[in-house]
Image (cartoon, grey):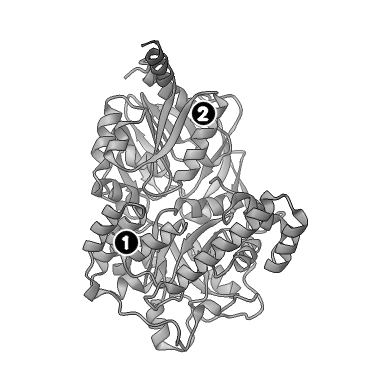
Amino acid sequence: MTISLVADEQKPKGVKIDSVENIQILRGTTLLKRGFAHMQKHGVVMDVTSVEQAQIAEDAGAVAVMVLDKLPYDVRKAGGVARTASVKVIQEIMDAITIPIMAKCRIGHVVEAKVLQQAGVDMIDESEVLTPADEERHIWKWDFTVPFVNGAKNLGEALRRIEEGCAMIRTKGEPGTGNVVEAVTHIKLVNSEIRKIRSIFEDGDSQELIKASRDLRASYALVQETARLGRLPVVNFAAGGITTPADAAFLMSLGCDGVFVGSGVFKSDDPAQRARAIVLATTYYDDPKVVTEAQKMVDEKKSLLGLDTKNLELRMQERGQSI
Amino acid sequence: MKYDDTAKTQKSKSLSIGVLGLQGDIEENISAARQALKDLKLEGEVRPVRYPEEIEQIDGLVLPGGESTVQSTLATIQHSLPAIKRRISEGMPALGTCAGLIILSRRAYDKTVGETGQKLIGLLDVVVERNAFGRQGESFESDLQIPMVGKDGFKGVFIRAPIISELGKDVQVMAKFNNKTVAVRQKNIIGTAFHPELSGDSRFYQYFLKMVLDFKQGRLQR
């Protein structure tokens, strides 16, 4: 895979032109944004709420941390409105660890996103885990210099987010449940939708491909690029419900580029050991010997108990899906 | 017998390149190296390597971009770090980009956090300052002059990039940006602060592959 630059907006506002000793330098380009996401590949991004947790995540081999006010499991329990994390906590974490720091903003909340960019986070997650701030639109991410990651539960949703300028996709699961079933379903759905457009592309039937792009409500150029590549044109991580090393390895085996672990680590009773084990299983997902070693490092009695996703009052995955 | 001889000659011309396959932009490095093989009309294969026994079988190793802390932690757990260290010290060429440069270096510290205590291979006699240009918002693209790979400018892609802050006596500077060293060579080892695998220009990998070919044919000075 090389970096695909299709769907790059003409002169996006997020690109900053500067010069150092008469040499032009560019910031916020699609190459830099998507390139950052490519550096996260085969890694584990861990949700954290404090400096202590961020330190544990870094020591365990997390590729980045995602700073939240509450872990998704606690968001679900607490109810009310979930907003972006305290800037103070984000900055304390920045001063303590060397790996990239991501933070979540509410869907459509342009100002929360600007605050996070100003505070210096490396990537912004416009996330359905928080309460949406706009029912009609997502953020126009081409206006930002820092890259964004967005959730998606099907191909059309993923491509619409890429059109808005996101540099990375998270296939949505159901956050805070400790149950991978939704993540698995959605990755398989995206994979099968890609296989379908791929076969249309291979048949050379442009008319059918245009029809597919209308059904997906995404631009033809982007659908064509996805069909040509046979995969999403940006890095795609799995998220939602990953609790054990075996869960992470399973999602990697379905073709994900890496994983996000939310409540699974810090809502367990063995977070440090579990974090290390999940990192190991993600890298060696195709080696049953190493995945078994990783499974031995965790105690099932210490896993987050988890929830059945059928009878949930709040289904976070459905937020923002129709726009 | 004759057939065997032919196979042997073929084999000595065919390069086997490994890309450390633990974390980071592994596939991008594989495709950049394959493109360079094609452009040089060389025979060979490029594949990810994760186990010590795979590291024994290659002629050159690329250490990709990504997070150096993650890669060195994983390389330590699965015992590939000592194998890499021994092969490189025996003369096998290595190219480290960004995180790879950090792992090859003698010492690394973070601009904000300071000493990190991460495990390093330590064979490249340089000190590296991590995240030296700042966080992702400060990541940038700019044209570099790298005479060793060609006259024309080379697109430097710097993503949360480090710089080389101290150089040992055997280390040769390959490129500078704003008076800061961003690419070096020390005999069989190359380290870059930027990502040549993302520039869409195979000249840097061609330069590395020529080094690997020289090593394979016994011409590379140790």
From the top left corner, tell me how far across and down residue A197 is, in percent.
65, 58
Bin the neighbour count of mark 1 within 10 Å (Cα to Cα): few under 14, some 14-19, many 20 and up: many
From the top left corner, tell me how far across and down residue A22 is, in percent.
62, 38
Name the residue beneath numbered marker 1: A278
At label 1, the amino acid type is Ile
Real-space CA distance between mark 1 and mark 2, rounded to the nearest whole angstrom: 36 Å
**Toward the viewer: B64 or B147?**
B64
**Toward the viewer: B188 or B179?**
B188
Residue under the point 51% across and 30% down: B204
User: In the rendered view, would you say B17 is above or below A320?
Assistant: above
Q: Which mark is residue B126?
A: none
**Toward the viewer: B55 or B174?**
B55
Bin the neighbour count of mark 2 within 10 Å (Cα to Cα): few under 14, some 14-19, many 20 and up: many
Whether residue B180 sits left or right of residue B187 in the image: it is right
At label 2, the amino acid type is Leu
Whether residue B177 sits left or right of residue A155 in the image: it is left
Regarding residue A133, the answer to whether it shows in the image is: yes
Residue under the point 34% across and 70% down: A243
Mark 1–mark 2 contact, CB under 8 Å? no
Residue under the point 36% across and 67% down: A92
Quarter of the C terminus of chain A within the rendering: bottom right
Chain letter for the residue marked with disc 2 in the picture: B
Chain letter for the residue marked with disc 1 in the picture: A
From the top left corner, tell me how far across and down residue A286 is, in percent.
36, 53
Q: Which mark is residue B37?
A: 2
User: In the rendered view, would you say B115 is above or below A133?
Assistant: above
